[in-house]
Image (cartoon, rainbow, N blue to C red):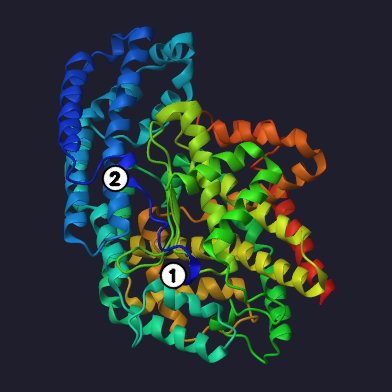
């Protein structure tokens, strides 16, 4: 497969971080960081209450440099691991980093506690001082966590034991999934799931059975991992006095609970859109009944063309260039600079991501490229993240480049939209247009409706874990089917196999509560793209300015310039209305 696609040599060059995991500079940098932390502690511990604006700036600048250098080692450890999780040396290096980083965190935790604990009469003048203007929002954010902070002794203890906490269980999950072999051919997760897009129904059924059998063989371990992480979240929320399982994620995302509820309620109120679409798809496929393994079946009008890696590159860069040559030039650096890892290979984790690394290096993108049209969109999506991270890092620095998850999806989804619109504009004939529209709608459903259905599954399992204790594999399956059924209605029949498919989704474990950010990003982008079509070229610099802002302000404030009110349910319904219009276009073409 890799040889046919031309992606076999698309391997990232991690020497931009270090020469390798045995690079002597890692040991030197680790010792230097440790010495700087000791000096930092001596200089500032117990003295934040008497600090001057200039001293506060010095302390935050030093802290930022310490964190950035630590992150650089961590990026190497993680990126090295995700493409060879079956390599014991890679796993050991990642675990060693987690243990070292936890010690660093333990010795630095005093700063956030002392700063957050300052009386408002002392903190506010410091925040208003011109010296601290660059870090004002970052420092205000730390104080938002004051009600949820523990004593320094408790925080140090939690930092000390964190390497054997949820991060360790996540690593086990990644090792397990990346080493799983499915079916007689012993294929990877990505390879077997790719068959769900095959036009031959029997191939799809076989893929569903093989994937289910593979998951079921490890379901006792996967169920245990899920229960442990649910319990870890429950305990942490209780210790930190978060009122609900989603509260900490909302605080991280800098949005009010009513924004999250407005989004979730709006999407659930329009479950009729995917149900209508799957009714249309059933007709187009000529089937009496649509099953879960038919969801991604290509339509008779869909192109089954395999897209080589070089063509994917040209499609994405051309679409980016039509919007902004600046975006194209940044995206091209990922291809030319070997910042991408593309081929499917044993030991590599599934899915795709963009790791921001540190502003003094650059982001890295990972995809599992199989040559499908959806892989082109995935590449555009991850490069959108990469462009966003590159711009924010270069202009805002390490602390201020940290974008809340809800805003992190903006550029990625916008990148997908640029490629889709470019392809649609160049489409010839009814069938090609219909195929593109349907493919895009299915991607949107995966980003909006499926993610909110998964959010409802998370809500159910977290609350049940807290009220009733551990969940059995059967109970996980029941809640999974219930929340998926709400979305699909009678448009799709969910089989027994599908009851275990909750168990391979990493977002539930890596970042509980994260998934609604996808729906947030998609619906936000639909509104932003509509503004672009109405305003033309004048929109572009404002959009790039938004990306370059990173996390220097809250999502609500950053979007004020676009006239967007996130707590207004009508805003979310507007984006859903655009999806409805796209579906009507498809229905009219049919």
Residue 255 appears in the picture as rendered: no
Count residues near mark 2 (Cα–Cα under 10 Å), then give few for <14, some for 14-19, many for 20+. many
The mark found on residue 3 in the picture is: 1
| Residue 259 occupies quadrant | top right
279 relative to 390 in the view: left or right = right
The mark found on residue 76 in the picture is: 2
Residue 304 to residue 377: above or below: below
Q: Residue placed at 38% from the left, 9% from the top?
A: 53
| Residue 153 occupies quadrant | top left
Q: Residue placed at 77% from the left, 68% from the top?
A: 433
Please state the horizontal and vertical placement of residue 143, each as a whole percent of the image. 40, 27
Q: What element carries label 2?
A: helix
Please state the horizontal and vertical placement of residue 196, each as a whole percent of the image. 52, 79
Please state the horizontal and vertical placement of residue 26, each as a whole percent of the image. 19, 37
Quadrant including the C terminus: bottom right
Closer to us: 439 or 136: 439
| Residue 548 occupies quadrant | top right
Q: How far apart are marks 2 and 1 (CA)?
A: 27 Å
Q: What element carries label 1?
A: helix
Q: Are marks 2 and 1 in contact (CB under 8 Å)?
A: no
Count residues near mark 1 (Cα–Cα under 10 Å), then give few for <14, some for 14-19, many for 20+. few
């Amino acid at each position: 497969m890799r040889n046919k696609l031309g992606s076999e040599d698309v391997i990232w060059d991690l020497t931009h971080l270090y020469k390798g995991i045995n690079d002597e500079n890692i040991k030197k940098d680790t010792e230097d960081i440790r010495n700087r932390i000791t000096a930092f502690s001596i200089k500032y511990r117990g003295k934040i209450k008497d600090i001057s604006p200039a001293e506060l700036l010095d302390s935050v600048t030093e802290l930022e440099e310490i964190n950035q250098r630590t992150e650089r080692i961590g990026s190497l450890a993680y990126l090295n691991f995700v493409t060879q999780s079956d390599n014991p040396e890679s796993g050991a290096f990642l675990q060693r980093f987690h243990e070292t980083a936890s010690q660093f965190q333990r010795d630095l935790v005093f700063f956030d506690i002392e700063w957050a604990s300052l009386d408002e009469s002392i903190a506010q003048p410091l925040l208003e001082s011109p010296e601290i203007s660059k870090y004002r929002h970052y420092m205000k954010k730390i104080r938002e966590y004051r009600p949820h902070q523990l004593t320094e002794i408790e925080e140090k203890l939690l930092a000390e034991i964190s390497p054997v906490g949820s991060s360790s269980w996540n690593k086990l999950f990644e090792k397990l999934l990346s080493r799983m072999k499915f079916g007689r051919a012993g294929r990877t997760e990505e390879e077997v799931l790719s068959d769900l897009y095959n036009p031959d129904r029997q191939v799809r059924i076989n893929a569903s059975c093989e994937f289910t059998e593979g998951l079921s063989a490890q379901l006792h371990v996967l169920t245990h991992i899920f229960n442990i992480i649910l319990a870890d979240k429950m305990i942490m929320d209780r210790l930190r006095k978060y009122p609900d399982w989603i509260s900490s994620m909302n605080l991280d995302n800098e949005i009010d609970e009513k924004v999250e509820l407005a989004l979730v309620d709006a999407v659930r109120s329009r479950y009729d859109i995917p149900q209508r679409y799957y009714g249309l798809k059933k007709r187009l496929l000529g089937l009496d009944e649509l099953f879960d393994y038919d969801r991604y079946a290509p339509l008779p009008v869909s192109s089954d063309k395999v897209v080589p890696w070089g063509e994917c590159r040209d499609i994405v860069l051309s679409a980016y260039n039509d919007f902004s040559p600046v975006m194209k030039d940044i995206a091209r650096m990922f291809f030319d600079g070997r910042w991408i890892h593309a081929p499917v290979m044993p030991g590599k984790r599934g899915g795709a991501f963009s790791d921001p690394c540190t502003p003094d290096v650059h982001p890295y993108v990972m995809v599992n490229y199989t040559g499908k049209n959806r892989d082109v969109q995935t590449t555009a999506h991850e490069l959108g993240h990469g462009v966003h991270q590159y711009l924010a890092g270069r202009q805002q620095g390490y602390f201020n480049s940290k974008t809340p998850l809800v805003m992190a999806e903006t550029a990625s989804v916008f990148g997908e939209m640029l490629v889709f619109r470019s392809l649609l504009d160049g489409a010839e004939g009814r069938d090609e247009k219909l195929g593109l529209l349907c493919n895009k709608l299915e991607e949107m459903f995966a980003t909006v409706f499926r993610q909110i259905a998964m959010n409802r599954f998370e809500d159910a399992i977290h609350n049940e874990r807290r009220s009733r204790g551990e969940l059995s594999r059967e109970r996980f399956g029941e809640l999974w089917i219930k929340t998926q059924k709400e979305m699909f209605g009678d448009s799709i029949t969910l089989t027994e196999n599908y009851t275990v498919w909750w168990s391979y989704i990493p977002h539930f474990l890596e970042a509980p509560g994260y998934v609604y950010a996808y729906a947030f990003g998609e619906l936000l982008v639909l509104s932003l793209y509509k503004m672009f079509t109405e305003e033309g070229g004048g929109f572009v610099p404002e959009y790039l300015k938004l990306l370059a802002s990173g996390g220097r302000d809250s999502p609500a404030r950053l979007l004020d310039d676009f006239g967007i009110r996130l707590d207004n349910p009508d805003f979310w319904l507007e984006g859903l209305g655009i999806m409805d219009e796209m579906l009507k276009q498809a229905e009219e073409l049919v």
